[in-house]
Image (cartoon, rainbow, N blue to C red):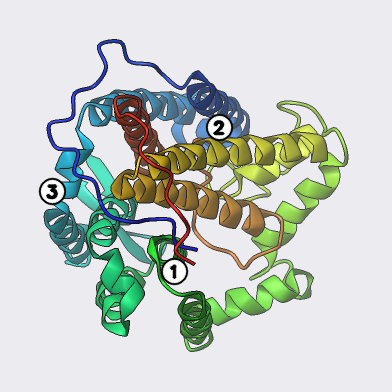
């Protein structure tokens, strides 16, 4: 249900002289990042030794990306939310520009059949990861200003949906099916919290599910993934190989795991053991208890971010509330899909596990999201609580 009334401008907001940090939030992020360093080290050593000649090569790059993410995230935390809100229209233009540039041969880099990376000299940036941040900020800015129109007419629903459809269309051209699902789900969830009617929300879910199912059915490789997901053991040495190896890792972990560093599946049996399927290595080395503990860490982080969104509602700040909610859904959605794929709950998607998987763009963007959340918390600390907002419906 909608809990927003009217946007509150926060331009020129002065932060308190003494900034109060949310140590619980930062502690959860630090714990997740530490688990990521530990698991990337464990899962990548064999591959790094074989491919690069050093067992520490991938871990060293991961630590460099983490340091870069911490630096950039801290810098982002210095940016006032009023700037994101005021220049939201520039964010969507930048998003579309990035998603078009990555499709141009020579500019976009193709890996494993997908053209998702932009090359800036020796640095590669995954365009869809940057787009996630920009889209959350753009739609939060748009919906905080137009939520009355969203609640009152179909026109208010169609306008943001047309923008979303354009973005998803560009993502599917890469193709990036997993990124499309995460971004579309996040934006529609933000529209719902901003005031879209429940029946409209459910209709969009049904329509979106149908369109995504059609995209999967009419694309041979996606259809193969779907069929394989339903019965991976039917072709366990070809299309079902990755999923069956992941399930073997879960089975070997049992309750308490085989022990840190003792995974067998990471020894060239499970592809992408240190990236998309790192959760399977967590389950193998730490068992059901360790896997469940990681799920709880993500749940606690998402809950902590949602609490910031709730505080923003009490301060009558629609923009900050929508940003916090969007980031929470984004992190939760990506973590759920990654874990669901590794455990056989969902069809295979190329999505990393935030803060845990190896991957420069994903790790840096995860840190940027936390930097934005820290800024939201700071600015709320500088605002006196406004009257509580009544539910619209």
* Place of residue 236 in the rendered image (x, y in percent of width and height, measured from the top left): 74, 67
Residue 40, numbered label: 2
**Distance (Cα) linking label 1 and label 2:** 25 Å
Q: Residues within 10 Å of mark 2 (few under 14, many from 20)?
A: many
7, 114: nearer the viewer: 7
Please give left or right for residue 295 compared with residue 103 in the image. Answer: right
- Residue 386 location, quadrant: top left
Q: Which residue is mark 3?
A: 86
Q: Could you tell me which residue is drawn at 18 percent across and 23 percent down? A: 14
299, 236: nearer the viewer: 299
Q: Earlier in the sequence, mark 3 or mark 2?
A: 2
**Distance (Cα) linking label 3 and label 2:** 39 Å
* Place of residue 299 in the rendered image (x, y in percent of width and height, measured from the top left): 62, 41
Q: Could you tell me which residue is drawn at 63 percent across and 51 percent down? A: 339
* Place of residue 33 in the rendered image (x, y in percent of width and height, measured from the top left): 51, 27
**Distance (Cα) linking label 1 and label 3:** 31 Å
Q: Earlier in the sequence, mark 1 or mark 2?
A: 2
Residue 177, numbered label: 1
Q: Could you tell me which residue is drawn at 50 percent across and 63 percent down? A: 1
Of tags 1 and 2, the one toward the viewer is 1
Q: Residues within 10 Å of mark 3 (few under 14, many from 20)?
A: some
Please give left or right for residue 296 compared with residue 159 in the image. Answer: right
The single residue placed furthest to the front in the displayed view is: 387
* Place of residue 119 in the rendered image (x, y in percent of width and height, measured from the top left): 20, 48
SS at badge 2: helix
Asked whether disc 1 touches disc 2, contact meaning CB atoms under 8 Å apart, the reply is: no
- Residue 346 location, quadrant: bottom right
Please give left or right for residue 46 compared with residue 97 in the image. Answer: right
Q: Is residue 217 above or below residue 393?
A: below
């Amino acid at each position: 249900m909608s809990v927003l009334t009217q946007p509150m401008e926060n331009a020129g907001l002065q932060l308190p002289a003494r900034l109060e940090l949310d140590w619980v939030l930062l502690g959860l992020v630090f714990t997740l990042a530490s688990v990521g360093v530990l698991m990337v080290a464990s899962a990548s050593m064999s591959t790094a030794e074989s491919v690069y000649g050093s067992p520490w090569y991938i871990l060293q790059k991961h630590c460099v990306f983490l340091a870069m993410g911490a630096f950039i995230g801290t810098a982002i935390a210095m940016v006032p939310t009023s700037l994101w809100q005021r220049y939201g229209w520039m964010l969507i233009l930048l998003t579309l520009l990035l998603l078009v540039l990555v499709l141009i041969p020579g500019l976009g880099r193709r890996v494993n059949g997908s053209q998702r990376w932009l090359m800036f000299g020796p640095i590669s940036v995954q365009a869809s990861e940057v787009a996630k941040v920009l889209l959350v900020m753009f739609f939060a800015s748009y919906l905080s200003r137009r939520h009355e129109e969203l609640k009152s007419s179909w026109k208010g629903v169609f306008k943001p949906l047309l923008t979303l459809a354009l973005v998803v269309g560009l993502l599917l051209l890469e193709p990036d099916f997993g990124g499309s699902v995460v971004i579309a789900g996040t934006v529609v969830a933000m529209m719902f919290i901003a005031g879209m009617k429940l029946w409209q929300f459910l209709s969009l879910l049904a329509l979106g599910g149908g369109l995504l199912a059609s995209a999967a059915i009419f694309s041979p490789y996606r259809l193969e993934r779907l069929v394989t997901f339903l019965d991976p053991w039917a072709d366990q040495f070809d299309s079902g190989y990755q999923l069956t190896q992941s399930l073997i890792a879960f089975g070997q972990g049992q309750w308490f795991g085989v022990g840190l560093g003792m995974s067998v599946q990471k020894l060239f049996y499970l592809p992408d053991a240190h990236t998309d399927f790192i959760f399977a290595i967590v389950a193998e080395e730490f068992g059901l208890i360790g896997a469940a503990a990681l799920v709880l860490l993500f749940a606690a982080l998402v809950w902590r971010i949602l609490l910031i969104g709730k505080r923003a509602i009490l301060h009558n700040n629609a923009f900050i509330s929508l940003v916090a909610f969007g980031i929470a859904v984004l992190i939760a959605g990506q973590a759920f899909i990654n874990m669901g794929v590794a455990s056989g709950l969902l069809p295979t998607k190329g999505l990393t596990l935030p803060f845990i998987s190896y991957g420069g763009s994903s790790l840096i963007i995860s840190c940027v999201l936390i930097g934005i959340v820290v800024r939201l918390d700071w600015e709320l600390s500088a605002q006196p609580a406004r009257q509580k907002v009544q539910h619209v419906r």
